[in-house]
Image (tube, rainbow, N blue to C red):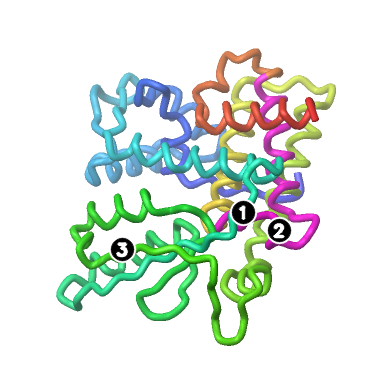
């Protein structure tokens, strides 16, 4: 394999959350060991997650059961929605409607922590700064922005608007605006790496060598880790804004094919426990691609 994949312990815990919101500690320790993590790393990570309120803990050692809190499981929803939206964009099913979505806020210095958190959320949702306190997205992000502002207690300081006539200086062409506002080269570089990793894993998965259950689970977690690294900073710009071919679409196709191969190799026994929402969406995308 050409690229080493660093999997954070926290991400591994999230990867093993089952549909009922639980994580089996024995499975967690087993997969962690396969990934080269020590039991101490896992114990410290569990302790931090429980202290943060992300999980509750029942039992001891390998017989323990972790329960994801409501906030944790709710956070998986938008991530899955964004992944499905990305695959639909790749398939040409989400054409841009020509509308820019803007969010403006004026949060006082006395609420700096909430102001910074709102700004970080806007960037995480794919927003780009037009000027101080004003962010723009090419996608309809209003429900997510309002939820974040409400949760942070600054909803009254938030203004939302949309327009089909956006100009920055003397630039109004959408493609040029997208090039100026978002770091497309950096985003592309992350997808190039994801594509290399997915290609190497796909060759193993479709090759003649038998792979153990632990190896299959490890591959799934590695793919999830790299997919997250590539997609978290991706604003999911409409395809017509991006260079062709776009490495994001190519990398996601390879990931989808990997997940389909994982499921086929595993016969559906272990893979549903690895980011089940990711797996379902990726396998659907692979099936659509084969059908096309």
Q: Position of residue 216 (x, y in %)?
A: 64, 26
Of all residues, the one furthest to the front in this rendering is: 164
Rounded to the nearest whole Å, what is the CA distance between mark 3 and mark 2? Answer: 31 Å
Q: Of callouts 1 and 3, which one flags the residue occurring earlier in the amino acid sequence? A: 1
Left or right: 145 with respect to 95? Answer: left
Q: Are discs 2 and 1 less than 8 Å apart at CB?
A: yes
Above or below, 110 against 287 in this view is below
Q: Which residue is mark 3?
A: 117
Q: Which residue is mark 2?
A: 240
Label 3 or label 2, whichever lies nearer to me, is: 2
Label 1 or label 3, whichever lies nearer to me, is: 1
At horizontal 79% and vertical 58% (from top left) the residue drawn is 244
Rounded to the nearest whole Å, what is the CA distance between mark 2 and mark 1? Answer: 8 Å
Q: Are discs 1 and 3 less than 8 Å apart at CB?
A: no
Q: Quadrant of the C terminus?
A: top right
Rounded to the nearest whole Å, what is the CA distance between mark 1 and mark 3? Answer: 28 Å
Above or below, 283 against 41 in this view is above
At horizontal 45% and vertical 56% (from top left) the residue drawn is 125
Report the label total: 3
Picture quadrant where residue 185 is located: bottom right
Q: Which residues are magenta?
A: 235-263
| Label disc, if present, on residue 96 of the rendered structure | 1
């Amino acid at each position: 394999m050409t690229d080493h994949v660093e999997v954070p312990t926290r991400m591994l815990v999230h990867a093993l959350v089952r549909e009922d919101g639980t994580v089996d500690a024995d499975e967690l320790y087993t997969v962690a060991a396969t990934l080269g993590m020590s039991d101490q790393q896992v114990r410290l990570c569990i302790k931090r997650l429980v202290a943060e309120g992300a999980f509750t803990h029942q039992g001891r050692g390998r017989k323990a059961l972790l329960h994801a809190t409501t906030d944790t499981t709710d956070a998986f929803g938008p991530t899955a929605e964004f992944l499905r939206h990305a695959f639909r964009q790749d398939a040409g099913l989400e054409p841009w409607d020509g509308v820019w979505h803007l969010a403006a806020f004026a949060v006082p210095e006395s609420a700096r922590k909430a102001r910074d958190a709102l700004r970080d959320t806007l960037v995480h949702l794919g927003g780009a700064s037009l000027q101080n306190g004003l962010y723009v997205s090419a996608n309809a992000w209003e429900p997510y922005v309002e939820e974040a502002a409400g949760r942070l207690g600054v909803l009254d300081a938030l203004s939302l608007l949309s327009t089909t006539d956006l100009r920055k200086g003397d630039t109004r062409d959408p493609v040029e605006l997208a090039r100026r506002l978002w770091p497309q080269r950096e985003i592309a570089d992350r997808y190039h790496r994801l594509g290399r990793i997915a290609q190497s894993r796909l060759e193993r998965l479709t090759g003649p060598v038998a792979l153990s259950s632990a190896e299959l689970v490890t591959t799934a977690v590695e793919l999830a880790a790299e997919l997250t690294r590539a997609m978290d900073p991706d604003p999911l710009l409409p395809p017509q804004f991006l260079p062709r071919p776009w490495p994001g679409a190519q990398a996601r196709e390879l990931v989808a094919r990997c997940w389909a191969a994982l499921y086929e190799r595993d016969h559906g026994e272990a893979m549903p426990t690895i980011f089940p929402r990711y797996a379902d969406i990726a396998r659907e995308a692979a099936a659509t691609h084969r059908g096309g």
